[in-house]
Amino acid sequence: MVAPAWAQTQKADWADTERAARGQTVYFNAWAGSERINAYLQWAAAELQRDFGVKLQHVKISDAADVVKRIRAEKQAGRKDTEGTVDLVWINGENFAAMKRDGLLSAPFAQALPNFQWVDTVGKPTTLVDFSVPTDGLESPWGMAQLTFFADAQRLPKPPQNMAELLALARSQPGRITYPRPPNFHGTTFVKQALIEHAQDVKALVQPVTPAALAAQAAPLWRFLDALHPHLWRGGKQFPQNSAAVRQMMADGELVMALTFNPNEAANEIAAKRLPVTVQSWQFAKGTIGNTHFVAIPYNAPSKAGAQVVANFLLSPAAQARKADIDVWGDPTVLDVTRLPAAERARFASTVRPGQLTQSAPALPEPHASWVDALEKEWTRRYGV
């Protein structure tokens, strides 16, 4: 059977991309706060060098927003389309929205990647929409995330199933619950979860924020936080800097529960013997905020072909299965595993580990990216002093 002309053309175009990529160095600006993720990228670098002649250089960063600022400064300085310092960036949410708005991204590329055919765009619609902003092929999905809580079942046999129950738990166990201080990502996500559960018109949250919408939809949120904070760790006067600090305080018995955006984090920590096997993970019964994280190519990336080859490799069943392995990273796949060829599907077979999420709840869509800054500023004004 002869392949259609468009498929032959696409295959030839991709072969040209791979040829152009050979010998290129791809400077991948990616968060470096996890030894597991750093090790995974070292593995990916070895695979890419061996199979495609592409050198992957992990540029370790702490905040993607800093990368966006650098690329914006390069554009304002008149840097040409091949004179940038970033070839690929790990990104999503408000940072993607800012790059898209300011013309800081290269031409659409994601759907042209051969491995994009396996992405689950139906069951995981956030692979095409990032914080209510259409991706339009400007970034390639890499992994899935959803707000998840975990606790030692011996200390918390009946975990809260919504924010109202969490408030009741905080009142019954004062000082044993907290969340990271916004603008830390996990802290802001906790606030957004509370916003979604309390907003009078959830549909308003997928639209760009306005002062009127913020005042109307966030008013119940602030009332909820006003009620919650006095019962939190240190009376809600101080907040941990990140989720790792919350997890450690839970491990030490100072807190009764912790939170993450990786449904497999507790299983990771149990496997690494940093949490007891009695820790269990859960999501709120009616759902928690979920999204996709991506990789994107800046407008002035010197190694655009190499960046596309890296993005395509990161979407390969082999790379996605390794990333999903709890012993490696435990980051959920963006692929529709049921559509993969049998041999590739077998890569994802695994047994349920202690601490692993056993029952997923619906993934609630993120508010529009513009809500992030507005919520963080108002949170800081009210509670950050």
Image (tube, helix red, strand yellow):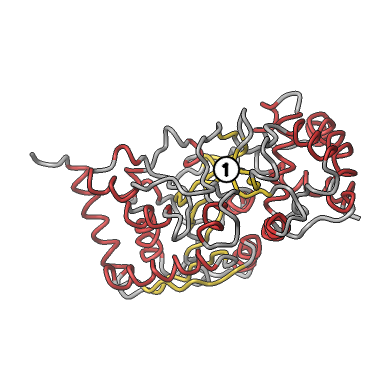
- Image-quadrant location for residue 174: top right
Instruction: Report the front residue among 104 and 26.
Output: 26
- Quarter of the image with the N terminus is top left
Residue 360, given in percent of the width and then of the height, sits at 52, 35
Residue toward you, 97 or 299: 97
Residue drawn where x is 55% and y is 70% of the image: 79
Q: Residues within 10 Å of mark 1 (few under 14, many from 20)?
A: many
Residue furthest top in the image: 200
Q: Residue at x 75, y 60 (%)?
A: 241
The answer to whether residue 28 shows anywhere in this view is yes
User: Which residue is drawn at the image coordinates 39% and 46% (left, top)?
Assistant: 351
Foreground pick, 176 / 381:
176
Q: Is residue 385 above or below residue 24?
A: above
Side of 85 relative to 345 (left or right): right
Residue designated by label 1:
146
Residue 100 in view in this figure = no
The front one of 67 and 16 is 67
The C terminus lies in which quarter of the figure? bottom right
Q: At 41% from the left edge and 68% from the top edge, which residue is drawn?
A: 303
* Residue 194, image x, y percentages: 74, 36
Which amino acid type is marked by label 1?
Answer: Gln
Q: Position of residue 25 (x, y in %)?
A: 40, 74
Residue 50 in the image: above or below residue 294: below
58 is higher (above) or lower (below) than 361:
below
Circle 1 — which element? Answer: strand
